[in-house]
Image (spheres, rainbow, N blue to C red):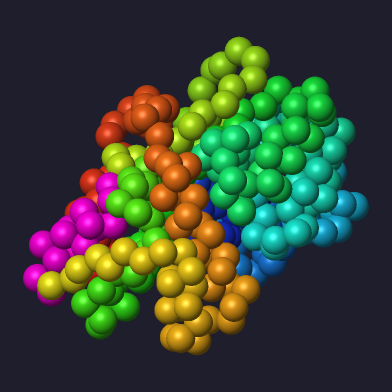
Amino acid sequence: MPTYAVTGATGRLGRLVVGQLLDSGIPAAEIAAVVRSPEKAADLAARGVEIRQANYDDPSTLPGALAGVRRLLLISGDTPGQRVPQHTAVIDAAKLAGVERLVYTSILKADTTTNPLAPEHKATEEVLAASGLTHTVLRNGWYTENYTDQLPQYLGSGTILGATGGSKISAATRADYAAAAVAALTREEDGNAVYELGGTPFTFDELAEAVTEVTGTPVVHRDLSAAELASALENVGLDAGTAGFVAALDHSIAIGELVTDSDDLSRLIGRPSTPLRDAIRAAQA
């Protein structure tokens, strides 16, 4: 019977967590990958991981998928407006299954930030606290991939647009956050825990400098107001709602909500977070 289970195991974060659990020496027979589409998990099955089918939107599928599991990583859903009922269904099923510790991927400063992504995470944390389950909350900061995935656009235009007002972002790579999740799942810890996670902070000016240095292509940062950024994004094809949402995220950065001086990430993973330039090199490759 598996000791560990990872929901959303075929997603970009979940797949890394399962891989790092295996690489850390956890036997494949002790790991369950909880997925909506088992055919997408063929590579994990080939490594001996048990594939269990379940759907956040169908609570009846969850108790069986979590049967016998001692430690569960609940990776947050990706459907806005549906996350709280989805997560609540998993938490209820975990309690029914007798899960000993549930680890949840939340967002940096979930209880205080005005970040538009935060309310569903804060509500999930409240459901988790009320459940009585022993739990660990991983408040992940921004992914470095939010920026390195845009490398072709940066190089094509020579410009990084933002509305961050020169404020810093404590971003880290998915692999860094996956390592933190593995640590939280496998370490012995008394009671509940909350970790504020983020990498070495950088500004958009520093991001532009790093892209220029690594790629050899000059890229500059152009700082706008939130309204100007939303307008610029609409001009390149985004609908008004999405453009406004992206601008609101940058406003959250501008007022210091996506930077942290916590060293929780490096303490959990036992090393510094991945340097920005290394992440850019990986994206370029």
**Viewed as shown, does residue 93 lie left or right of 245?**
right
Residue at 47%, 42% in the rendered image: 257
Count all numbered tags in the image, as a single digit: 0
Residue at 86%, 58% in the rendered image: 58
Q: Quadrant of the N terminus?
A: top right
Residue at 32%, 78% in the rendered image: 153
Q: Closest to the observer: 39 or 154? A: 154
**Viewed as shown, does residue 220 lie left or right of 43?**
left
Q: Which stretch did the figure color magenta?
A: 202-217
**Viewed as shown, does residue 189 lie left or right of 233?**
right
Residue 256 drawn at (x, y percent): 43, 42
Q: Residue furthest right?
A: 60
Residue 192 drawn at (x, y percent): 64, 20
Q: Closest to the observer: 267 or 158? A: 158
Residue at 74%, 53% in the rendered image: 83
Q: Quadrant of the C terminus?
A: bottom left
**Viewed as shown, does residue 256 lie left or right of 86?**
left
Q: Closest to the observer: 51 or 86? A: 86
Specify whether residue 103 is in view.
Answer: no
Specify whether residue 77 is in view.
Answer: yes
Q: Is residue 151 above or below residue 12?
A: below
Please check the rendered image and state whether residue 28 is part of the magenta-colored stretch, yes or no.
Answer: no
Magenta stretch: dominant SS?
helix
Residue 139 drawn at (x, y percent): 54, 37
Residue 112 drawn at (x, y percent): 59, 35
Q: Is residue 6 above or below residue 152?
A: above
Q: Residue furthest top?
A: 190
